Image (cartoon, rainbow, N blue to C red):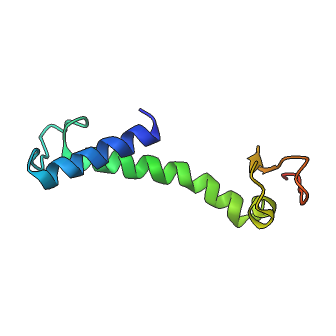
Amino acid sequence: MEVLEKIAKAEQHVFDLCEGRAKWTMRVPVDEEKDSDCIIMAALTAAREAIEPLNKVVEDGQADCAIESGCKRRIKGWGCYDNCRSYTPAT
């Protein structure tokens, strides 16, 4: 399941919990598809794993040219496109 699908599933589960259409469940043995904690943790873990590499790029300054110049084309690989006025190749 893709990151955004996991997040959407968790959002729907939380909404269903709030609306009373679902109850918080934690089974023994674990049911990763139906247990509330597993649904939410799967989304949070997937989001963290997707964000961590992007944070490294920003921390290393490799995305600065796209951010500072307002480049609409953003990043190709981990550096700006060649035609960006402030192009800096990825290292």
Q: Which quarter of the image is occupied by the N terminus?
A: top left
Spot occupied by residue 90 in the image (x, y as percentages of width and height): 84, 52
How many numbered badges does the structure rendering display?
0
Q: Is residue 46 left or right of residue 88?
A: left
Spot occupied by residue 70 in the image (x, y as percentages of width and height): 76, 61
Q: Is residue 66 above or below residue 22?
A: below
Q: Is residue 66 above or below residue 20?
A: below
Q: Residue at x 35, y 43 (%)?
A: 8
Q: Residue at x 81, y 64 (%)?
A: 69
Which one is in front, 1 or 80? 80
Spot occupied by residue 21 in the image (x, y as percentages of width and height): 10, 44
Q: Is residue 35 left or right of residue 3?
A: left
For this orientation, the residue located farthest to the top is 1
Q: Residue at x 20, y 36 (%)?
A: 31
Q: Is residue 53 left or right of residue 41?
A: right
Q: Residue at x 17, y 47 (%)?
A: 16
Spot occupied by residue 30 in the image (x, y as percentages of width and height): 19, 39
